[in-house]
Image (tube, grey):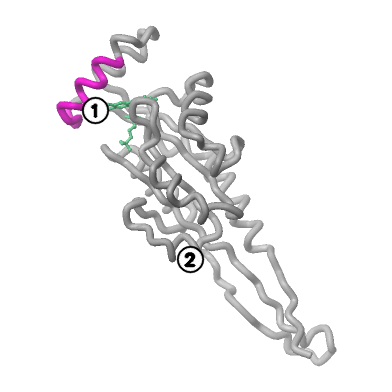
């Protein structure tokens, strides 16, 4: 955990005000991700290293973990327009309400604004996170890694793709995964973590 000053400490001086303990709260953050071929996991791992937060696959998360977390960084890849994390966050929606949530989406069309809007709408993402807290990151397609079924799906998708560069990427592979892509996500996450650290509550002992 990032928090160094945890619950209570008392100023040594004797004035009435200074005898009041100061509670310095700190925000508990968690990175939760889903990944089939490793691109989203790679981003989650880099975020974990930079933000000093734990990163865990969604399947390992308990309800208690969710209750004990204030700040979530959720990451999901897109397959045929669908976020693989959708089923999970739809079930866990109640736990995410009134918490800080950032969402990173890893896909083949990270720079295409029209496709971004479609992905957000089709996956009802705005029910758990505000649009300004959604980040699109370029993913990776390695044809040698893909299952037979995924190869077929991608080839069929390529038949309908009009953009020649994207079409080629779907057929022969692409790799846009890089640490640099995470700069805006890290900056937003640090903003929330700093806000959490600054929440100071005076607790009266009298
Ligand atoms: C079968 C298949 C379908 C995909 N469908 C989409 C899609 O609809 N939209 C998109 O932007 N990217 C699509 N992609 C690209 C993936 O989102 C990208 O490869 C991502 O990096 C996968 O992340 P992962 O390695 O964490 O599973 C697809 C990839 C495959 C293999």
**Count of marks, rendered view:** 2
Residue 152 occupies quadrant? top left
Q: Which residues are magenta?
A: 144-157
Dot 2 lies on which element?
loop
**Residue at the image point whose x is 24% and y is 28% from the top:** 142
**Residue at the image point whose x is 55% and y is 68% from the top:** 3
Quadrant (top left, top right, bottom left, bottom right) of the C terminus? bottom right
Residue 98 occupies quadrant? bottom right
Rendering quadrant holding ligand 1: top left
Q: CA distance from mark 1 to mark 2?
A: 35 Å
The residue under label 1 is 142
Question: Quick one: 157 or 175, which is closer to the camera?
Answer: 157
Q: Is residue 126 above or below residue 99?
A: above
The residue under label 2 is 1
Q: Position of residue 137 (x, y in %)?
A: 45, 32
Q: Is residue 69 above or below residue 39?
A: below
Q: Position of residue 77 (x, y in %)?
A: 37, 35
Assess disc 2: are there few (<14), some (14-19) or many (≥20) residues with their C-alpha within 10 Å of its C-alpha: few
Dot 1 lies on which element?
loop
In the picture, measured across the screen, residue 24 lies left or right of residue 146, that is right
In the picture, measured across the screen, residue 180 lies left or right of residue 11, that is left
Q: Position of residue 66 (x, y in %)?
A: 47, 60
Question: Quick one: 120 or 3, which is closer to the camera?
Answer: 120
Q: Are marks 1 and 2 in contact (CB under 8 Å)?
A: no
Question: Quick one: 61 or 24, which is closer to the camera?
Answer: 61
Q: Is residue 155 above or below residue 51?
A: above
Ranked by sequence position, the earlier of labels 1 and 2 is 2
């Amino acid at each position: 955990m990032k928090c160094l000053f945890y619950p209570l400490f008392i100023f040594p001086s004797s004035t009435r005000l200074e005898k009041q303990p100061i509670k310095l709260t700190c925000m508990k953050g968690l990175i939760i991700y889903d990944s089939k071929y490793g691109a989203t996991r790679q981003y989650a791992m880099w975020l974990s290293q930079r933000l000093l937060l734990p990163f865990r696959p969604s399947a390992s998360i308990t309800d208690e973990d969710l209750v004990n977390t204030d700040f979530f960084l959720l990451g999901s890849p897109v397959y045929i327009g669908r976020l693989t994390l959708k089923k999970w966050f739809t079930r866990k929606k109640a736990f995410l309400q009134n918490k800080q949530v950032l969402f990173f989406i890893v896909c083949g069309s990270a720079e295409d604004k029209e496709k971004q809007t479609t992905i957000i709408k089709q996956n009802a993402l705005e029910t758990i996170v505000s649009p300004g807290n959604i980040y699109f990151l370029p993913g990776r397609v390695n044809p040698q890694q893909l299952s037979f079924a995924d190869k077929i799906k991608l080839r069929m998708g390529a038949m309908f793709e009009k953009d020649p560069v994207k079409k080629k990427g779907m057929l022969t592979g692409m790799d846009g995964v890089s640490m640099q892509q995470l700069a805006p996500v890290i900056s937003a996450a640090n903003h929330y973590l700093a806000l959490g650290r600054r929440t100071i509550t005076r607790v009266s002992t009298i």
